[in-house]
Image (cartoon, helix red, strand yellow):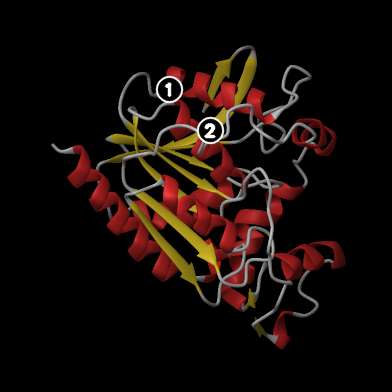
């Protein structure tokens, strides 16, 4: 599907019906990664309409010269929300870079966003990350990928098995060739948001924060610092999980997301 926001055609996938859930992917991929991980969860939890946009410069959403900062990306997302969700209450989820934007959306729409989930979120600055450590590596995977794609897989996953390779090939690798590198460099050169997401009043709705113990991109200490701003937050650090936590710990992720959705429903009322 496609919605035009301020002259920019924003591509997104949509599934289901009910309370809207806006799910934002990380940098260097497209909506397929987060959708591929979350759709099996939502299939067992009815009553949610999932929207998965391609962020500017990734997938099928372009990054024209009018978008040259993360503030511009945020404005585009707010316009997309107005276009596709309107003034309905909704939930927002974000993985990695998408987590940074999801926090900003919740900050801008604190009453309308009734639930927030952050998966391996990065922020304005990232500190104290561990070195990339491969915990599980199956010898039979060698030679199944081109050298360039294998390097991408090996540097992303800390659990390297036939199943995580399948997920990488299905949900991650196809999007890499669609990235507008100059466009992203232009946007990320103005990375910090004008309004720091946690500078406003504390966010009162249910929150889920998942961090990977072996995450060499976002770490787990910076995400922990977010807890003070989110008094209704569950925070979990998962062992055997790096920045690809969604793929490396799908069962734990499912349990925690389903519990968060239940908390959102309870907090929001009928």
Residue 236, which numbered label?
none
- Disc 2 target residue: 12
Quarter the C terminus occupies: top left
115 relative to 229 in the view: left or right? left
The residue lying at 49 percent from left, 57 percent from top is: 37
Q: Secondary structure at mark 2?
A: strand
- Coordinates of residue 51 in the picture (x, y in percent): 44, 36
Choose between 227 and 117: the one closer to the eye. 227
Give the vertical position of 244 relative to 265 (above or below). Answer: below
Taking the view exactly as shown, the residue that stands out farthest to the top is: 7
Choose between 56 and 68: the one closer to the eye. 68
- Coordinates of residue 135 in the picture (x, y in percent): 64, 82
- Coordinates of residue 198 in the picture (x, y in percent): 50, 39
Numbered circles on residues, count? 2
- Disc 1 target residue: 84
Asked which quadrant contains residue 67, the reply is: top right
Categorize mark 1 by other alpha carbons within 10 Å: few (<14), some (14-19), many (20+).
few
Q: Secondary structure at mark 1?
A: helix
Q: Earlier in the sequence, mark 2 or mark 1?
A: 2
245 relative to 139 in the view: left or right? left
């Amino acid at each position: 599907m496609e919605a035009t926001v301020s002259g920019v055609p924003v591509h997104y996938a949509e599934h289901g019906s009910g309370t809207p859930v806006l799910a934002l992917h990380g940098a260097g991929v497209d909506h397929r990664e987060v959708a591929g991980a979350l759709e099996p969860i939502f299939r067992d939890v009815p009553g949610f309409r999932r929207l998965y946009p391609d962020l500017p410069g990734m997938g099928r959403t372009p990054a024209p010269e009018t978008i040259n900062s993360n503030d511009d990306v945020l404005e585009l997302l707010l316009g997309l929300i107005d276009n596709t969700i309107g003034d309905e209450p909704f939930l927002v989820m974000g993985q990695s870079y998408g987590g940074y934007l999801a926090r900003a959306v919740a900050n801008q729409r604190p009453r309308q966003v009734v639930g927030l989930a952050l998966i391996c979120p990065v922020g304005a600055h990232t500190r104290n990350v561990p070195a990339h450590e491969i915990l599980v590596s199956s010898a039979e995977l060698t030679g199944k990928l081109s050298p360039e794609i294998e390097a991408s897989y090996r540097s992303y996953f800390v659990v390297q098995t036939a199943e995580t390779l399948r997920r990488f090939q299905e949900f991650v690798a196809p999007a890499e060739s669609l990235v507008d590198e100059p466009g992203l460099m232009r946007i990320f050169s103005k990375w910090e948001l004008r309004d720091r997401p946690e500078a406003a009043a504390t966010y009162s709705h249910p929150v889920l924060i998942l961090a990977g113990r072996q995450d060499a991109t976002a770490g787990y200490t910076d995400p922990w610092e977010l807890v003070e701003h989110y008094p209704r937050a569950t925070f979990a650090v998962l062992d055997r999980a790096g920045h690809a936590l969604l793929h490396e710990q799908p069962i734990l992720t499912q349990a925690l997301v389903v519990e968060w959705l239940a908390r959102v429903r309870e907090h929001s009322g009928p």
